């Protein structure tokens, strides 16, 4: 079904409000889910969230618990199947017939729930993959269907909110950790590490001002391997 302009705008505005108000990642994901369901109805929608350290994706949110209750897996590795391919390439993939595409696994599950075609859309922030949105339909795609373009616009719009929510969660966790540290040196070392990770920096140094000099107190990343002067003048 071709998405009408009014429906697109309504979905985008609703997503903007929901995503902007979301202070956690789950809230931002749910906002995307609601917009995707409205845009691609009668699709079954699933959102796979990225675990960057494990190079994997976890099934995090679904539009219909009954449909996905018997989905065979809950975790997919980067490069594995259609979802894993989208996570690696960062490109939307449209599958007109899930039973004819070799990248599509779990044919029995698709057949059991009468799902015939699907769109897999990456949720990106700059060059980083945050999640993959999969919209599976019971029918082939009609001519002139514009759902992938609208979905791409929607997830691009929400990616900043997801990234901000992730950073807020990281900051809250760092705050809890810092509150338990009593040693000044350990505290500064943890702050240097947190700054490096949150700001994607390769090198962090932390200096305290003592009179007319700055005393090196903590390093993180490449700075720890440099011959840094322990004291430098202001």
Image (cartoon, helix red, strand yellow):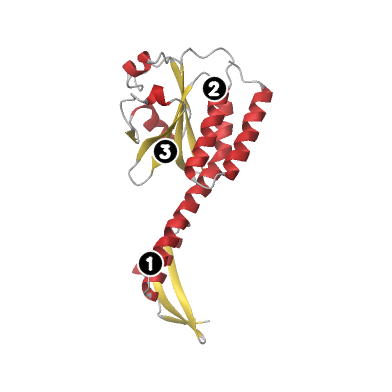
Q: Residue at x 48, y 44 (%)?
A: 25
Say which label, 3 or 2, has the lower sequence index: 2
Query: How much space separates mark 3 and mark 2, taking CA atoms?
Result: 20 Å
Residue 227 visible in the shown view: no
Callout 3–callout 2 Cβ contact below 8 Å: no
Q: Which mark sits nearer the N-terminus, 1 or 3?
A: 3
- Above or below, 229 against 97 in this view is below
Q: Is residue 140 left or right of residue 101?
A: right
Q: Which mark is residue 49?
A: 3
Q: Is residue 176 above or below residue 41?
A: below
Crowding near pointer 3: few (<14 within 10 Å), some, many (20+)?
many
Q: Give the CA separation, mark 2 to mark 1.
A: 47 Å
Mark 2 or 1 closer to N-term? 2
Residue in the picture at 45% in, 37% down: 131
Q: Is residue 217 visible?
A: yes
- Badge 2 density bin: few <14, some 14–19, many ≥20, Cα 10 Å: many
> Which residue in the structure is indicated by mark 2?
40
Residue 52 numbered tag: none
Quadrant the N terminus occupies: top right
- The image shows residue 169 at horizontal and vertical percentages of 46, 52
User: Which dot, 1 or 3, sits closer to the camera?
Assistant: 1
User: Where on the picture, by quarter, is residue 21?
Assistant: top right
Residue carrying label 1:
180
Image location (x, y in percent) of residue 203: 42, 64
Q: Secondary structure at mark 2?
A: helix
Instruction: State if disc 3 and disc 1 touch (CB < 8 Å).
Output: no
Locate residue 7, reporting x and y percent.
65, 24
In the foreground, 18 or 115:
18
């Amino acid at each position: 079904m071709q998405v009408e302009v009014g429906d697109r705008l309504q979905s985008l505005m609703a997503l903007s409000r929901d995503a902007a108000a979301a202070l956690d990642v789950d809230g931002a994901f749910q906002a995307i889910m609601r917009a995707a369901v409205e845009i691609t109805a009668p699709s079954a929608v699933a959102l796979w969230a990225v675990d960057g350290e494990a190079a994997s994706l976890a099934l995090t949110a679904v539009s219909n618990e009954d449909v996905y209750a018997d989905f065979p897996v809950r975790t997919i590795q980067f490069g594995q199947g259609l979802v894993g391919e989208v996570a690696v390439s960062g490109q939307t993939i449209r599958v007109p017939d899930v039973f004819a595409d070799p990248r599509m696994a779990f044919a029995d599950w698709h057949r059991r729930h009468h799902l015939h075609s699907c769109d897999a859309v990456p949720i990106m922030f700059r060059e980083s993959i945050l999640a993959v949105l999969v919209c599976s339909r019971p029918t082939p795609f009609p001519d002139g269907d514009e759902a992938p373009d609208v979905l791409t616009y929607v997830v691009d719009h929400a990616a900043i909110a997801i990234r901000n929510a992730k950073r807020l969660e990281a900051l809250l966790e760092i705050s809890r950790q810092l509150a338990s540290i009593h040693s000044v040196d350990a505290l500064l070392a943890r702050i240097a590490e947190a700054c490096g990770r949150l700001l994607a920096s390769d090198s962090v140094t932390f200096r305290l001002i003592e009179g007319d000099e700055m005393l090196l107190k903590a390093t993180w990343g490449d700075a720890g391997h440099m011959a840094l002067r322990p004291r430098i003048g202001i």
